[in-house]
Image: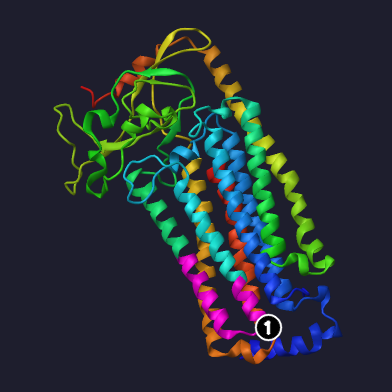
Amino acid sequence: MASETMEHQSNNELWGGGKSPFGASYGKLMMWYFLLSDAFTFAGFLIAYGALRFSVPSWPLPDFVFRLFPFAGHTVLPLIFVTFMTFVLLFSSYTMVRAVQEGHRENKNGVVFWMFLTVLGGAAFLGCQAWEWTTLIKKENMSLTQNPFGRHTTDGVYIDKSYEDVHGHGHEGHDDHGGGKDHHSMNNDTHYGLLTGGGGGSMEFKKGDSYLLHKVPAMDAEGHEILDEHGQPVMEWYKRKFKFKDPKTGKEEMSQEELGPKAFGGLFFFITGFHGFHVLSGVVFLIIVMLNVMSGIYEKRKNGYEMVEKIGLYWHFVDLVWVFVFLVFYLL
Amino acid sequence: MSNLTYEQSKSIALKTILLLAAITVVEVAIALVGKGYIGGHDFTTTFIGAAVIGLVMAALSFYKAIKIIFEFMHMSYEIKGLYMSVLLPTLLLVWAIIAFLYEGNYWNDSRQKLKMKHESSIEYVEPAKDILKDDTYLM
């Protein structure tokens, strides 16, 4: 109630000076300045990602990290799922524009309809992100401090078999949806050398090839699984050993796969999480404004549903940030 | 506000969203062709190839951002003072990006230098021994 009274006053006196600065209402201008400050926050995070990425010799290849699709098993579909997520968010941005336009011509039902579609789009995006995170955390053991995705910095030859070659895909348990082709068969007929993921049958690899470390039950000397106090198997990383020729000395040397750059997990979960939190709060505010539209509050104000326009600015900003998150995390 | 009719602004919104979707498809296509998933030739192995692909994708994303700000967020229908006061401060980011990426690269160089210094100051040790020591699961 109080805010409604204030809005009326400021509209009547146009900010008290008789003429509104920049020809915009107080609320709209402040929304723009909030978004400007938020843009700097996101820019800070993304620039930190860039600086840390440049500070290490190798960085996980996004096309390899983000290659899975729901219900498609192990089929290698680089970037297809995030592209789908981008379309969901773009579409919800369009429905928001439509809601604002219906607001300008005081069409209450139109505003509610298009806002409802926007809420659905936002919720769908959050669902996609939940799947993406669950896959990375539960299936691929990525965490804030541990990153199983790495890339080779030299050419070389593996001297032991990949975990898949020894045990099949059993380590991923019963949540394996099967279905599509696994990446072994993809390897044979297409250029997927970059995407072998430590498996794929081939023992040779090239500089820049990606691998994914798996967690396997730890074994004692007699080959029995080691159990913790709860009777659960203790898990450890399965790191393949390989030979490579030292470029400087020309000598053949031994090494093994290691966890990828540590900062990757923290940056990924923090930045996409911060964006996801913006989407979540956007959905909450959209629902509140939509309920207010239905109740007829904004109709009485006769200002072309300006509140819808303001929440619309925020929603487009979320889409705008995603353009850059998409560029920095997935495309480059 | 704008002087556009309802029908005009409706068609502008539709055109903008189709353009944004098309640019997104082009960006993903560039990413996949550039790394060789389509066509089979990895262009990112050379510095020039990686830089050109990166810059093209960054430029396309920037164009998408402009479209979202000026059409979806209606910035092109606001008065000049408003959009200057919002957009000019973001120019500061240009220097922030250059400076921090340069700095990140410097960290990498320093790390490599330290590693080489460390390697040249110690006796050559067969690295295989160290690794095979904790090799429990193969035994």
Residue A106 in view in this figure: yes
Q: Residue at x 69, y 61 (%)?
A: B69
Q: Residue at x 79, y 64 (%)?
A: B83
Label 1: state its secondary structure. loop
Residue A75 image offset from top left, x and y in percent: 35, 41
Q: Nearer the viewer, residue A309 or B15?
A: B15
**Relative horizontal placement of residue A164, taking residue B76 as reference (left or right):** left
Q: Quadrant of residue A285?
A: bottom right
Chain letter of mark 1 equals A
Give the labeled residue for mark 1: A304
Residue B2 vertical placement versus B60 (above, below): below
Decide whether residue A52 is among the magenta residues: no
Q: Quadrant of residue A259?
A: top left
Decide whether residue A110 is among the magenta residues: yes
Name the quarter where the N terminus of chain B is drawn: bottom right
Give the crowd class for mark 1: few <14, some 14-19, many >=20 residues within 10 Å.
Answer: some
Residue A42 image offset from top left, x and y in percent: 62, 54
Count every numbered label the image shows and give the total: 1
Residue reaching furthest top? A250
Residue A154 image offset from top left, x and y in percent: 48, 20
Residue reaching furthest right? A18
Residue A48 vertical placement versus A299 (above, below): above
Protein image colouring: rainbow
Name the quarter where the C terminus of chain B is drawn: top left
- Amino acid identity at mark 1: Gly
Q: Nearer the viewer, residue B20 or A118?
A: B20
Residue A237 vertical placement versus B113 (above, below): below
Residue B43 image offset from top left, x and y in percent: 58, 28
Q: Which residues are magenta?
A: A98-123
